[in-house]
Image: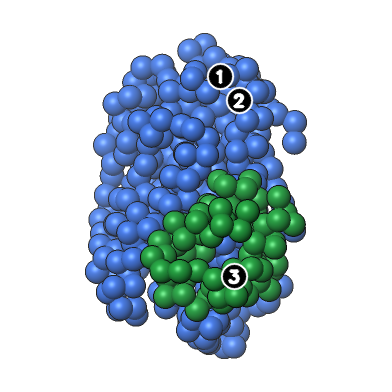
């Protein structure tokens, strides 16, 4: 697509909430031998993850993060003109979770609300949408909520996905101010690769039935899942990332007139350490400028970029910083952004 | 080309012993889905290529791999 660019719109606050329930991945050995688990965990670098308690949904983490942010920033809730909820693990098939959250958060009925259904690219898609609405002078503030309970999407008996995913949610407040300067977005999709990361059943194409909930062995390695679990072709996802992401990053740098040296922090989707490290090496980046949180939270899909900002850059984003964001995954869908953060209020991580 | 590939292949998969062109590489003790990721990184780093899964599944021997690399590079 053509690059989108915006002036004087930015993230004035960002909060994150995660489950208190911490999984030590080395001890996640119910279905696989400890030696195999160690090999997987060493290579993926995902040492801990957070799993939501049974009563919590993605929206509950977003709600907790939003309450913390709006309270600490003393935001007048009547000024929130748009609420966007980004997730692929919503509360219900209908109504949209964003609408439920409008009421829960005590926002006025004048607030516009809708959901965005995308995965690892979705925080950047959501931001670009928020920024686009904010170009209208009538919009004072946008609340972008992004949450996932990805731990429930995959089978614990499928070693290709069992050790990667975690849960959490964030809330970002988008406002208009001169200090934010210029921002740039580049958004992409390739539905020819819909099978690389997918859940086959449970929607309207293949509705839920006893058959789609039956566990079965799906490959020669003895991995077990149902048709309502997600699956992933990790090899082709890696091939896809190598082919598309460096190209996408070069193009957003060029479109924004940025030199790689101008970027203070590079925030990549937290997929796994092996792939992220290879990407860093391929792009010849200084690891000091590439914050990592996947060792603590695993792959939280769309939440992984903003949760890294909260957990790794809480003190750094007080002063002006130029960030490059790059998200990629299920779809396939990928997006990048170059934007400035300045005086961004980041509360301490919330645990529920 | 052959020896250069074999050296890079052994390093990527951390194989200590000898590697022959006729070896079925999936029979190596070192071969698993994590080794596959190492091979993907090596192919990108050394040759600037990606071999999609559908094609990769048809490759059986080290010689097949080399032929595929030569074709793609």
Give the mark nearer the N terminus: 1 vs 2. 2
Seen from this angle, which residue lies furthest top?
A178
Residue behind mark 2: A253
Asked whether the beta carbons under mark 3 and mark 1 sit within 8 Å of each other, the answer is no
Residue behind mark 3: B21
Task: Name which residue lies at 75% across and 31% down.
Answer: A2
Residue A96 place in picture, x, y as percent: 58, 54
Q: Tell me the distance, in whole angstroms, between the alpha carbons under discs 1 and 2.
A: 7 Å
Q: Helix, strand or loop at disc 1? A: loop
Q: Chain of mark 3?
A: B
Q: Tell me the distance, in whole angstroms, between the alpha carbons under discs 3 and 1.
A: 45 Å
Colour seen for chain A: blue
Residue A67 place in picture, x, y as percent: 35, 40
Colour seen for chain B: green
Circle on res. A259: 1
| Crowdedness near tag 3: few (<14), some (14–19) or many (≥20) residues, C-alpha within 10 Å | some
Between disc 2 and disc 3, the foreground one is 3
Q: Helix, strand or loop at disc 2? A: helix
Left or right of A320? Residue A254 is: right
């Amino acid at each position: 697509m053509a690059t989108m660019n915006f002036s004087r719109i930015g993230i004035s606050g960002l909060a994150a909430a995660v489950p208190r329930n911490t999984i030590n991945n080395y001890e996640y050995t119910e279905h696989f031998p400890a030696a195999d688990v160690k090999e997987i965990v060493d290579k993926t670098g995902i040492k801990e993850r957070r799993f939501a308690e049974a009563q919590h949904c993605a929206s509950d983490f977003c709600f907790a993060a939003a309450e913390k942010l709006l309270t600490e920033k003393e935001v007048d809730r009547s000024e929130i003109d748009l609420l966007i909820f980004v997730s692929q693990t919503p509360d219900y098939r209908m109504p949209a979770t964003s609408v439920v959250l409008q009421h829960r958060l005590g926002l006025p009925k004048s607030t516009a609300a809708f959901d965005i259904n995308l995965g690892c690219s979705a925080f950047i898609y959501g931001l670009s949408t928020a920024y686009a609405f904010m170009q209208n002078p009538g919009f004072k503030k946008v609340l972008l909520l992004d949450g996932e309970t990805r731990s429930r999407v995959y089978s614990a008996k499928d070693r290709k996905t069992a050790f990667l995913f975690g849960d959490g949610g964030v809330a970002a407040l988008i406002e208009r101010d001169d200090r934010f300067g210029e921002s740039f977005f580049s958004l992409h999709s390739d539905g020819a690769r819909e099978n690389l990361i997918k859940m086959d059943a449970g929607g309207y194409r293949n509705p839920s039935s006893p058959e789609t909930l039956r566990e079965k062995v799906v490959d020669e390695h003895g991995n077990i899942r149902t048709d309502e679990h997600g699956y992933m072709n990790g090899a082709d996802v890696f091939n896809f990332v190598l082919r598309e992401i460096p190209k996408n990053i070069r193009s957003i740098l060029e479109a924004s007139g940025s030199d790689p040296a101008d970027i203070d922090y590079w925030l990549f989707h937290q997929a796994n350490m092996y792939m992220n490290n290879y990407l860093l090496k391929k792009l010849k980046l200084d690891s000091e400028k590439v914050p990592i949180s996947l060792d603590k939270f695993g792959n939280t899909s769309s939440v992984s970029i903003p949760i890294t900002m909260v957990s790794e850059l809480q003190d750094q984003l007080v002063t002006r910083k130029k960030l490059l964001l790059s998200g990629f995954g299920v779809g396939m869908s990928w997006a990048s952004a170059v934007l400035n953060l300045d005086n961004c209020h980041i509360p301490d991580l919330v645990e529920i | 080309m052959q020896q250069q590939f074999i050296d890079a292949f052994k390093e990527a998969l951390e194989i200590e012993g000898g590697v022959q062109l006729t070896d079925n590489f999936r029979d190596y003790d070192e071969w698993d889905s994590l080794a596959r990721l190492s091979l993907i990184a090596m192919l990108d780093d050394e040759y600037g290529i990606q071999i999609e899964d559908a094609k990769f599944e048809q490759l059986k021997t080290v010689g097949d791999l080399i032929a595929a690399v030569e074709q793609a590079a």
